[in-house]
Amino acid sequence: AGRLQIEALDVAAAAQIAALAERLAARGHLDLLINNAGVLVSGERFGTLRAEDLARSFAINASAPLLLTQALAPLLARGHAAKVLCVTSQLGSIAQAREFRTVSYAVSKAALNMGVRRLAAELGARGITVVAMHPGWVRTDMGGAAAPLQPPDAVRGMLTVLERLTPAQGGRFYAHDGSELPW
Ligand SMILES: NC(=O)c1ccc[n+]([C@@H]2O[C@H](COP(=O)([O-])OP(=O)(O)OC[C@H]3O[C@@H](n4cnc5c(N)ncnc54)[C@H](OP(=O)(O)O)[C@@H]3O)[C@@H](O)[C@H]2O)c1
């Protein structure tokens, strides 16, 4: 009891990221950061793509995990074999892109994937392992009722991959079942 502490934050607000890092600094170290927050603008079609949807998707899906990880890196570096999991999506895979849909989401997740590679290179040297993970198609508000996976199953899978993660796996792109996905 008393071990869970909840800190609310809008990850798209730089000032709130700085404030969180300041509040957490007193704790001395962090062992795990999961960048999970994300948004998906549904129903996008070629011809009606909106600048504000692209910008908001980019801010939350791509910029926020980079900035939050950067802000918490000093705490992670003092952690025990610290790990950073960026929850991305298979829709962000450039290799698998076939059609013009969920474009703001796909483009921003592709950018996040690049961010993961860059962070992994920088932070690996400080003992922090950074990976990208696709949770599967999950029955959440975003995934919708047709999704085959229940959230506990997706989470259990991702935690198993995370528990077994070694520093040599930094910068890789996994699915919740531990299989590797093409960038
Ligand atoms: N569901 C799927 O099938 C699926 C597939 C591939 C990848 N993913 C990824 O998995 C992650 C979780 O998705 P989900 O399915 O749980 O989506 P979801 O049901 O739409 O939930 C999204 C979560 O992100 C939070 N969030 C959004 N904007 C935020 C912000 N600016 N600051 C802080 N939190 C914010 C939301 O908080 P509030 O409710 O407070 O707004 C909510 O808790 C996302 O990164 C998503 O891209 C999901």
Image (cartoon, rainbow, N blue to C red):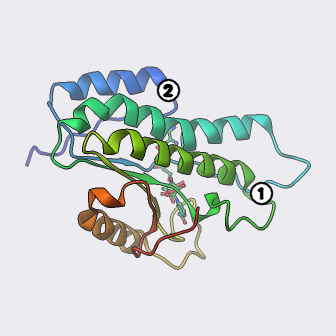
The earlier-in-sequence mark between 2 and 1 is 2
Q: Does the residue labelled 1 lie within 8 Å of ligand 1?
A: no
Depicted 3 relative to depicted 98: above or below: above
How packed mark 2 is, by other alpha carbons closer than 10 Å (few <14, some 14-19, many 20 or more), is few
Mark 2 residue element: loop
Residue 22, numbered circle: none
Answer yes or no: disc 2 within 8 Å of ligand 1.
yes
Q: Dot 1 surroundings within 10 Å: few (below 14), some, or many (20 or more)?
A: few
| Residue at position x 44%, y 20% in the image | 15
Q: Is residue 9 visible?
A: no
Q: Mark 2 points at which residue?
A: 13
Q: In this view, does 135 lie to the left or right of 123?
A: right
Q: Where is residue 85 in the image (x, y as percent from the top left)?
A: 38, 53
* Quadrant in which residue 5 is drawn: top left
Name the residue: 27% across, 21% down: 22
Q: What residue type is labelled 2?
A: Ala
Residue under pointer 1: 43
Horizontally, is 103 left or right of 83 in the view? right
Which one is in front, 29 or 56? 29
At 44% across and 74% down in the image, what residue appears? 150
Q: What residue type is labelled 1?
A: Gly
How far apart, in angstroms, are the residues tagged by discs 2 and 1?
26 Å
Q: 40 above or below 71?
A: below
Between 149 and 62, the one nearer to me in the picture? 62
x%, y% of residue 18?
37, 22
Labels 2, 1: front one: 2
